[in-house]
Amino acid sequence: MSDHKLTDWLPTTRKEAKLRGWDELDVVLFSGDAYVDHPSFGAAVIGRILEAEGLRVAIVPQPNWQDDLRDFKKMGRPRLFFGISAGCMDSMVNKYTAAKRFRSEDAYSPDGKHSMRPEYATSVYSNILKQLYPDSPVVIGGIEASMRRFTHYDYWQDKLKKSILIDSKADILVYGMGEQPIIAIAKALKEEIEKSGAEYITADRAHELTLDISQTGHLTKKEEITPSDNDHILFSHEECLNSKEKEAKNFLIIERESNKRHARRLIQQVDGKFTVINPPFAPMTTEQLDHSFDLPYTRLPHPKYNGKRIPAYDMIKFSVNIHRGCFGGCAFCTISAHQGKFIASRSEESIIREVEKIASMPDFKGYLSDLGGPSANMYRMGGNDQSRCEKCARSSCIQPNICPNLNIDHSPLLKLYKRVDTIRGIKKSFIGSGVRYDMLLHSTGDKQKDNNTAKYTEELIKNHVSGRLKVAPEHTDDKVLKLMRKPSFAHFRKFRDIFNRINREQKLNQQLIPYFISSHPGSTMESMATLAAETKELNFHLEQVQDFTPTPMTMATEMYYTGINPETGDKIFCARNMREKEEQRLFFFWYKKEEQSKIRALLKKMGRQDILKKLGL
């Protein structure tokens, strides 16, 4: 910290703004997370990207919403807009487990405190700002706004909720990764101020100026909508309340449009108004992504947190994100739904610059904790024939099978790993992100590419595992895995054999750590009992497990709420009450003596003496 001045961070107070010589601000950002000036923290990214546009930007991290609201007043009214994000996670997912109990800590708050952000933080912050500054534009973004932009199921209230634009009273919504839309919004409003000579932009004028900006949404009246052949009218919120089938059909349209290169504008009626969501920007180019990651981040928490631990920062402090997007399309995952399925990769040069910056940090010991992304091994991958991708609406490029047009050449990753490992100060670079082992097992028929994949697999296991390689089979039942959009468990068994062989050959003593989920739609007591038997046979004492948490606007959540598979219309069993969920979770822990009597009782009730015998119970 001693090498930095206070002005190396974006200002969080009036005093800090004055140290920069600023008497007024263009944009004030409010975040549910602590302010860590690092490219893995959304508020820092948006603040830095706007700063690079020549704007005066301040961040108010974790404002107090329960006192006299001084945190919301202290920076005054900005010339352009207020920006709001609940943080890197949906605030309800951040606070609560699948059992609706408080999480052990808030990873994005100093010392892990739970009291630093409200429930439904985006709407709470926005309503306060609209109360204090009714005529100032409010722009909401981040994963909470993104995944709640239409009618959506909320697990914590167990009901369908309206678009967050209704509850928040915000003027503009940004969805997905926000650099491109926020730059477009800022430019439009800045140009208006320069042209009109006005002191501030009003909310109404901001609404008018941003109606057609890609990857944004707004509320409007019917007569204000200019019809287009590129529109799709969804079932209204009220229709979805009365029909789970219509809610399921809506979701299928939303997901398919989110996965297109050329999407339609989506419109949904709610409370007599219309939520209008414009199509997304094209995926960021390498140059655009490099620009975002090359901004002058300190990579450190703001000095106000001196002496306090921010758990999420501890995890990513010495990690590097090499790409965005994920074409896995897992049914339960918000990452690909938020970032999109098309991969945007950084250049090697940008990645190397960041690694060198980490290597120069005074407390760095030589070990990169992660050189990865949403999925570790999708760097620089995409369609061989981009014209085919232009017409594609598949939610996943690798499920139920790997697209023959997908280039899964792992040679760019091999080259990157080797280059990173030659940097002075780097002793080891580990891959902490999840690896898609189904791609490592796939034969393309191209000998060179398949040879590169085999080399990558060996390089990964031999040189980039920190003792434990984490992978995510998620379940053992292929029917459940199909609903999850995950590969057959046979793939995991095959990868385990390869992992063990390479460990033997290299005389390594590494562990393969599988992740599993209970109570996912389609998962039954029978399938969980089978999971217990299969993991015992493989000699796994499971640690990395979780109960399925329905998060807004994922395929699995729609299945959970509607009891329907939106893609087929088939009915699906879902463990909905806490007793059912707890019983499914029990089967992860067949090896724990304190749980075995309960498991015995359940298996006897199910008439599964065969599994009792396999488990030795």
Image (cartoon, rainbow, N blue to C red):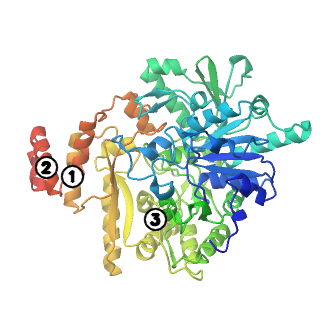
Is residue 361 visible to us here? yes
Q: Residue at x 33, y 57 (%)?
A: 544
Q: Amino acid at mark 3?
A: Gly
Nearest to the observer: residue 145 or residue 247:
145
Measuring from the top left, give residue 545's x and y in whole percent: 32, 53
For residue 611, the mark is 2
User: Pointers 1 and 3 in contact (CB under 8 A)?
Assistant: no
For residue 440, the mark is none
Instruction: Tell which residue pokes out farthest to the front in this image.
Output: 68
Q: Amino acid at mark 2?
A: Ile
- Local packing at callout 1 (Cα closer than 10 Å; few below 14, some 14-19, many 20+) is many
Q: Residue at x 31, y 55 (%)?
A: 490
Measuring from the top left, give residue 447's x and y in whole percent: 49, 67
SS label for mark 1: helix
Q: Amino acid at mark 1?
A: Ala
Residue under label 1: 532
Measuring from the top left, give residue 415's x and y in whole percent: 57, 73
Marked residue nearer the N-terminal end (2 or 3): 3
SS label for mark 3: loop
Nearest to the observer: residue 158 or residue 71:
71
Residue under label 3: 432
Nearest to the observer: residue 483 or residue 165:
165
User: Pointers 2 and 1 in contact (CB under 8 A)?
Assistant: yes
Compared to residue 361, the image places residue 373 above or below, namely above
